[in-house]
Image (tube, rainbow, N blue to C red):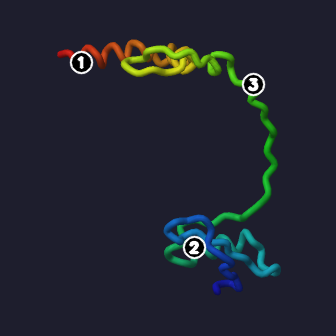
Amino acid sequence: MLLGCQVQNGIGDPQGQLFVVTFPSLLDPVLGLLRLQIGLPGILSVEIDQTVKTQSADAGPAPSYLTDKTPVSYYGTTVWHGYVAQPATDLIRNDAAHSALARRALE
């Protein structure tokens, strides 16, 4: 119990190294955090738990090509046409990459 702080519970860390710590109400939380981080070996990081405001977002409906479930042959396997027809496949030059791999496999 340093500075009157108390470990309340561990949270979601498989290695058991993440904790919720409370400060007495008389202690300025920022000062307490600084003292914890500087004053104790083994403490790597501390932060104040606080509520934040986020903006809402709406992704809208899924693009129509993603719902195209027509089966097509895709490099030896059957996949939905919507998977192959995504604009990203052109951006990353997917066909050229697959062709280059196929050429190397034949060499």
Q: Which amino acid does label 3 sit on?
A: Pro
Distance between the Cα atoms at labels 2 and 1? 56 Å
Secondary structure category for the residue under label 1: helix
Instruction: Name the spot of residue 47 as percent of width and height, x first.
Output: 67, 64
Q: Residue 46: name its quadrant.
A: bottom right
- Which residue is nearer to you in this view: 89 or 55? 89
Which residue carries the number 3 mark? 61
* Residue beneath the point at 41% across and 13% down: 95
- Which residue is nearer to you in this view: 82 or 100? 82
Secondary structure category for the residue under label 3: loop
Q: Which amino acid does label 2 sit on?
A: Ile
Which residue carries the number 1 mark? 104
CB contact under 8 Å: marks 3 and 2? no
* Residue beneath the point at 53% across and 70% down: 17
CB contact under 8 Å: marks 3 and 1? no
- Which residue is nearer to you in this view: 51 or 56? 56
- Which residue is nearer to you in this view: 3 or 86? 86
